[in-house]
Image (tube, rainbow, N blue to C red):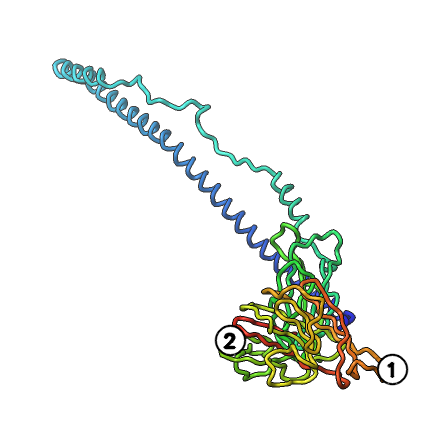
Amino acid sequence: SGIEPVSPALIKESASQTRDVLKQHFNDLKGTLAKLLDERLVTLLQEVDTIEQETIKPLDDCQKLIEHGVNTAEDLVQEGELAIRGGIGEQNEKLWSFTKKASHIQLDSLPEVPLLVDVPCLSAQLDDSILNIVKDHIFKHGTVASRPPVQIEELIEKPGGIIVRWCKVDDDFTAQDYRLQFRKCTSNHFEDVYVGSETEFIVLHIDPNVDYQFRVCARGDGRQEWSPWSVPQIGHSTLVPHEWTAGFEGYSLSSRRNIALRNDAESSGVLYSSAPTYFCGQTLTFRVETVGQPDRRDSIGVCAEKQNGYDSLQRDQAVCISTNGAVFVNGKEMTNQLPAVTSGSTVTFDVEAVTLGSTNNNEGGNFKLRVTISSNNREVVFDWLLDQSCGSLYFGCSFFYPGWKVLVF
């Protein structure tokens, strides 16, 4: 359940990955910035073209008018000269025609020429302050973290599962959410198993004696992005997964056989574990995923051996809790009661062997176990006397009405 020391190779690998990420990111930024600058340049050049075309047109028109006027005047002068040169009769006629033409042409009128102050003179205003703004942003862009704000603290093996606990290692970091991922060591990609505000989670899809890698990251308060990943930790479970007995009428099981659902079949009797996989000193946990109609004969608990013919664990050589919170030891109801079981309730059993000082006790049992049952933040502790020494126990459940669904780990 401990955490292995980190090897220098892992630091080198993380440094190498960080270098690659940084190079890739800044390359992408360069490309994007170049594209943005090119687009801005095109926009400004188009503005120059537009202004040039719009302001040259009236000047062009003005020039055309002046050229036309000059040409007309030249023609008229020629005509006048010819009239002067001609004979008297001819001269009078030509002069009359010339005078008529001249009076119709306004040689002294010119089109309106724009004032010099109104004539555009294009220039580009370019301010270097953008460099200072961009420079400040670029120099603050990106950070390199020598260690992530969260690390995995411990891995605790459970039957068919591993409890992963993590903690904050950066006091200045306020976490809003955590995100836990795992993968088989032989697999290439991690998958999410938990996102939330808790700092521990039990990963249940664990095959015994197989190495798994775990990593965790956090999201800061009010932030969108996740922090860097913690150093991956390797864990495994040597404990055989707890399984319910398959093929028992009245109960449907999940593919891993760690979840039992009381179905609609008419059936009474106790559904037991497939083997005595609960060992003294461990914690056995039942999580009630969904609830059905309660009955005072319902039971969830542990026993020394499977005994068929009973419709509940409220019998000899067994301890159990009913869905209404009553606790039974060897079939006898205890005065201390626990809260009633609701959807999402977790019920845990901790059993430890108690060494007896003297063998001749008159309580009818030869072997004493101390049992702690806890549910909904309350617990009861009592001694359980058995006929013979028992290192491993079966677990079981019985429900009279359908809809109850129990996960065991």
Q: Quadrant of the N terminus?
A: bottom right
Compared to 57, does 174 lie above or below? below
Task: Describe the element under mark 1 as helix, strand or loop.
Answer: loop
Residue extending farthest to the right is 357
Compared to 198, does 58 lie above or below? above
Q: Mark 2 belongs to which amino acid? A: Asn
Checking the image for residue 358, the label placed there is 1
The structure residue drawn at horizontal position 58% and vertical position 68%, both measured from the top left corner, is 289
Q: Mark 1 belongs to which amino acid? A: Ser
**Residue 26 vs residue 288, the one in the foreground:** 288
- Rendering coords of residue 304 (x, y %): 70, 83
Q: Quadrant of the C terminus?
A: bottom right
- Rendering coords of residue 247 (x, y %): 54, 84
Q: Residues within 10 Å of mark 2 (few under 14, many from 20)?
A: some
The structure residue drawn at horizontal position 44% and vertical position 27%, both measured from the top left corner, is 119
* Labels 2, 1: front one: 1
